[in-house]
Each structure stands twice: as structure tokens, then as C-alpha cells.
Image: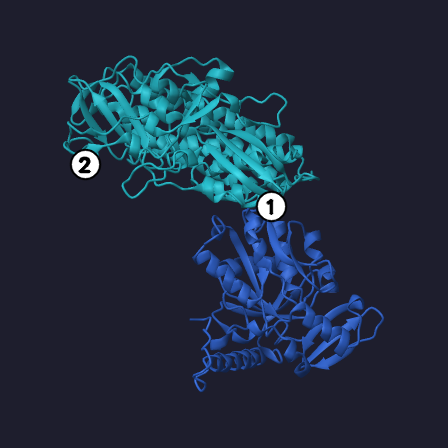
Chain colours: A blue, B cyan
Amino acid sequence: MEYLGQYKAVYKAKSGCEDILAKSQDGGIVTSMFAYALETGIIDGAIVAGPGSEPYKPEPMIATTVEELFEARGTKYSISPNLALIKEATRSYGLDKIGIVGTPCQIQAVRKGQLYPIGLRDVPDKIALAIGIFCMENFPYQGLFQMVEDHCATKIDNVTKMDIGKGKFSVYTERGVNSQIPLKVTHKYEQPGCHVCLDYVSNMADISTGSVGTPDGWSTVFVRSAAGEAAFNKAVEAGWIIAESMDGVKPGLELVEKLATEKITKNQAYLEHRLHKDHPALKPLRNPYI
Amino acid sequence: MSKVVEISPTTRHEGHSKLVLKVNDQGIIERGDWLSITPVRGVEKLAIGKTYEQVPKIASRVCGICPIAHTLAATEAMEASMGVEIPDDAYLLRIILQAANRLHSHALHDILALPDMYIPGTDTKINPFTPEEPVRSVAKRIQTLRMIGQTIGEIVGGEAVHPSNPRVGGMYKNITPRAQAKIFDLAKQAIPLARAQMEFMIAVFENYGKRDWAEMCGREVAIPKDFGFHQQGYMAADPMYGSSSLDEHPTWDPARWLEVRPWDWYMGEEEITMDDPAYPVGGTTKAGKKAWPQMQACTGVPLYDGQPVEVGPRARMSIFKNYDRKGAIGLNIAREMEYMDSVYKMIEAADALNTSGSTVADVIPQGDGTIGWAANEAPRGCDVHLAKVRNGKVEWFSMLVPTTWNFPTCSRALTGAPWELAEVIVRAYDPCVSCATHMIVLDENNKLVAQKLLE
């Protein structure tokens, strides 16, 4: 399981709150964890991908109440620069214990910022809970817009949910017209930066979660750090989250590992390619992991 | 026959300065020159041609102790030149920022001043870094007060050092109600600490004022009764915040200000004729070397009504609160007495603040080249910035910073004191030298060539 990082425990889990599940992507783990942490004071505010000015173009926002948190439910397949708010959260928002959700690269940035707080004075000790999500790749907003509007032939304003699973990109609308395109079509819209990423399951997060490996309506949850373990166990005890063992769950961790291996080997090959060993005329590009 | 002694560099204050002292046979100073030898920053020249948004940010980089005062003074100088009126909530945020800066800076000064002082009732000097009581709890209290000042500065200003939130036209962001509550909590935490700190420090300074001697260079040096007295006037714009040319009744007058060059003010070239290897740390400059204050001084000499004036806590207290204690000890005590004001001011301003109010002016004119000035009462005294803005670009910018005003005044206060204790007088002014440094142009023979350029 070398590509799944270090973890204390792994669960099949979903939210214990019907309101959250009604509009969540899968198990509603991120929303439930932050809602529980906000209610119990583990965090006093969470940086989440809130609704932006355009549909499905997320903008980072700081949620300090459960109501604000609910506005940010569901996955947006375009990146939300959550780290942009991490300093402001400790400043004019006056937060002391921050929760942050992010893709693996964003969680790496959080941890790097904690190690080398350049431009982040007095921020590192205020990050209380970092939740990472599984991420294969991400789309710039223009790319996502084109996938939905052109390939799926759907007006993006009408979309109620987007989903990637089982090799397909699916779009659901209010009017009941759903469309699916094979993932192969979407590859050219991916962000180029995603192709050098060697992290699939947010190895650096306190808790990482995603839909892969568990049945519909459930999420796979890796509990990684002591802080994450304490918060997760309390949330389960309080009933905010229903957690079950991963034993015997189909498709289970095998699928998570398969996808992680797929992403990382593919990206490692791309990193090799970037060195341009066979083409001395081309400038070798840096491996961002070194 | 008077002798010349040089203490270079002076220690336990911000920046780089030195003392050139003419002393009589008893070691009493006949004439003292205290001058800045910090390399020039050149901020006033860098500012020319920049936009009005850039200049306050550049100006704040002159120093890391009171960047808040420089940001606010420069921002308001731009606003004064352009005629921008800021919303009330932005003004309240600036007052909180100002008070937070003063709280942290005064606490920092306590750490720097304490090693000269004695534990009352004993002949033991205070080492603020000793783990022994009562000093350890004082040091912890000082650090807590600094933490509170810096944290509030961070919340309101975006950054405790070089605040990012102030802008021409107000403030970029208002704070949230949660941040407002945090300011209340921190300020209330500071009230008993600041009061205890003030009372402790006043007791320590009073004790020093009553002593007959202080130990220096391994001997007992007599402390005169008029230790650090001078006959110069005081200048202050406001007890807490400041004034600008937009005010209905401005409290500073550019027509009364004149700046002369150090060449016309300080001593000429002198040979050092006395040294003392026992002076901390490493002794004074060796006899036989040369000192040339009028050439080496990197400051201008600003005069108010044709005389050097004192700025700082005592100036504020004298002008607005009838404080009349003279000398180095009187100045130190005045500074301690400002602790409570800065804490209560934060609470008052946070109370009056509307967290959903607008903090940016609706209209920001781009400036027509009028001269505007803003005087900000920095922890060390009145910090005046002057600017001319035309079409969004800064045409001229000048900073008259607190320690520049204090250099010639403090030099006069040195007369009559034993030379070994000259630094105690200098430290009473809580000098912040780096921002006091102005530009000097020298040719290849080290001759001053461009005095006029600087005016």
C-alpha cells in the first residue's frame, strides 16, 4: 500500500445527518467533519470551496457556522484556491483554530507552509484540521465549461451535480436530462500541473476522503494523524458520522490502490519525459518533488 | 582642558548611532553630539514617481519597530495631498492599529531600559534574562504585552510588521465580529498586565532617580540631580493618534519647521583623546582615532521655531496633560504612563467600530500636486510625512521622523551628565535610529557636494 501513505485507520463512512447527505457528493464526510468540529470547538472556522459568482466556479470562503458550511457542499471539479485565505483567516477573521479542505497539492502546500512559514507569520500553529480529498486531476474552469456545455450539451447553469466515476464524467440536471462522456474525452482539458503530482489520496492530510473504493453514497476515509483520529472518533461517537470497517467492502482498497498506482506511475513517467533525456536540445524541466 | 571620548556604537536601541562627547577633567560632559551612523535608506528618493499606493508600503520598510506609524503617516500624507476623506470605521481601525503598535513598542523599550536600572533597595542591576524572580515574571509580562500588541496589530493591520491593510482612502478590509471580540479579549487581558508593568517600571525608574551613584566601568559614577535635563521645547500633534493638513485645526505647522544640515550643527573633526577599555561592551573608541560628527551624521537637523524640540511620550504628556517632570527619568516615567491609554483606546475604538461599515472612501481624487502632511504620534514621538501627489504619482515625499527631532535635543540634554551615563540618557528617548537616517551625497574625496539637493 505504498501509494496510500501512512494511516492509522481506514473506514467506509458516511454522514449521519440527512441534511448533509441530501446535497453531498458521496458520503458528505468533509461537511460533517467540519460541522462537528465547528459545533464542538475543534475548529472555529473552516476554509472551504464556496459557491462563486459563476456556476461551478468555486471561490474559497471561510465558514464559521454550519449554515455557511452547507453552502459549500458537493464537489466542484475546478480548483478553489483555498490557501489564498489561510493568512486572512488568522487576521481580519480572527480565527485561532482553522479547518481547511484541499486537494493533495493544497494539503502539501499547507504542510510546507507550516514547516517554512514564509509570508505566513503566526499561521502554522493555527491550523487545527486539514482534510484532504482524493484527486486524480483537476480542470481549469474554461475546460470544465467546455466539457459540460459542448461535450455534454448541457447549459452549466442547469447542472445540479457533476460526478466522475466508473470511467465516466456524468452531469445531472434539474430537468432530469443527464449526460455522460467517457473520461478519455476529458483528458485534454486537465490542468497540465496535475501531471507532475505524485499524490492521489492526500498523504499529508489529517483525514483524507473520497468516493473511490466504497459503494455509492459512502466514502472511503483514511485517518492519518493523531489530531485527525481524535476528531474523527469523536464525530463517530457523537453520531455525525457513521463509520464501518472496510473489510469485505467491494471494490475496496484494491481499487483505491489501483487508481493511486495508475496516477503515480503515469505521472512519474511524465516527470521522466520532462527531463528530455533523448532530446539534448530541449531544456530539462524540474521535478517539483525534488 | 577638555577631552574627547567616543562611544561607538551605542547599544540597546534600534539602529546604529554613536556619541562623541567633550568632557572636562571630572568626566562631566561639556558638549555632547549624538548622531546616527546608520546607512541611508533613501526612501524619500525612491518614492518619487511611484504611485500613491506604493509609497506608504515602501515608507513602512524604513524600520521594523514602528512600521505601523510610518504606514499610517505616509498613507495620510497622500490622503492629505489628494484631499481624501476616509470613513469613520477605517479611522477607528487605524486608531486600534496605532494603539497596538504603541503597546508593543513601549513594552519592548522596557526590556532595553531595564539593564541600566537597579532592583529597588539593592545595588544589583536588573538582568531581564535571568530566570530568577522578581525579574522573570516581569520579562514574561513584557512578552505577553508585546504578544497582545502584535496580535491585535495582525488582526487589524493584516500583519504586525509592515501592515498590509491600511490603504489610501481607508482600509482594505473591515474585521469580522469574531475578530472584534478577540480584540476585546486581548485588550482586557492586557489591562491588569499593563497596569502592573507601569507601576513596576515607575518604581524602578523612581528608585534610579533617587540614587546617588550608578556602577559603570567598574566604578561608582555620581548621578547628578539634573540628569538629562534640557531647556528645549516640546512638540506633539495629539495625545494618541495624529493630525493632518486636512484637519479643521491642524496641530502641526509646516511654516514653523526648518531643516538644517548636520554640517552646520555638529562638531567639526576632533581627535579622540580619552578612552576607557572597561566600558561595556569592549571599551570606547581608542584614543588617537578621529571623529568627525558633522560629516558622519546621516540625519538632517529639523528645527521647530528655530530650535530643536523634544518629541515623544513626555512631549505628548506635557502638551496635553500638564506633565512637568524633566530629565531622563521623567521621560521614562512619561512613557510608562502611556500604557493604560493605549489599552483603553483600543477598547474604546473597538467598541465604536461597526464591523459591517464601509472602510474605503467612495471617491479617491488623484491629486493636483498640493502639498499635504500628516503627523502621526508614533511610540517615539511625532512622525511627520509630507507629500505632493499629482495624477496618482508622488512628486515629492519627505519624512520627519521622531528620532530625527530628538537627536539635537538629546545632544543638549547630555550636557552636565557624567560621560559614562550618556547612554542612559540616550536610551530614555527610546531611539529608533534607522528611520532617522537621511541621504548625504559625497564626492570621491568624501566632500559633501549636494546639500541643496536634500532640501
Q: Is A146 rendered above or below residue A204?
A: below
Check disc 2 and report the residue beneath it.
Answer: B282
Towards the viewer: B163 or A21: B163
Q: Amino acid at mark 1?
A: Tyr
Q: Nearer the viewer, residue B97 or B294?
A: B294
Question: How many residues crowd around disc 1 within 10 Å: few (fewer than 14), some, or many (20 or more)?
Answer: many
Q: Is residue A153 above or below residue B347?
A: below
Amino acid type of the residue that numbered disc 2 sits on in the rendered structure:
Gly
Query: Distance of mark 1 from mark 2, alpha carbons?
Result: 49 Å
Residue A133 visible in image = yes
- Residue at coordinates 45% horizontally, 85% vertically from top-left? A279
Taking the spot 56% from the left edge, 37% from the top edge, the residue there is: B75
Q: Which residue corresponds to the image point at 14% horizontal and 31% vertical from the top-left?
A: B287
Pinpoint the chain carrying mark 1: A
- Residue A74, percent from left and from top: 69, 64
Closest to the observer, B388 or B152: B388
Label 2: few (<14), some (14–19) or many (≥20) C-alpha neighbours in 10 Å? few
* Picture quadrant of residue A51: bottom right
Residue extending furthest toward the right: A175
User: On residue A93, which mark appears?
Assistant: 1
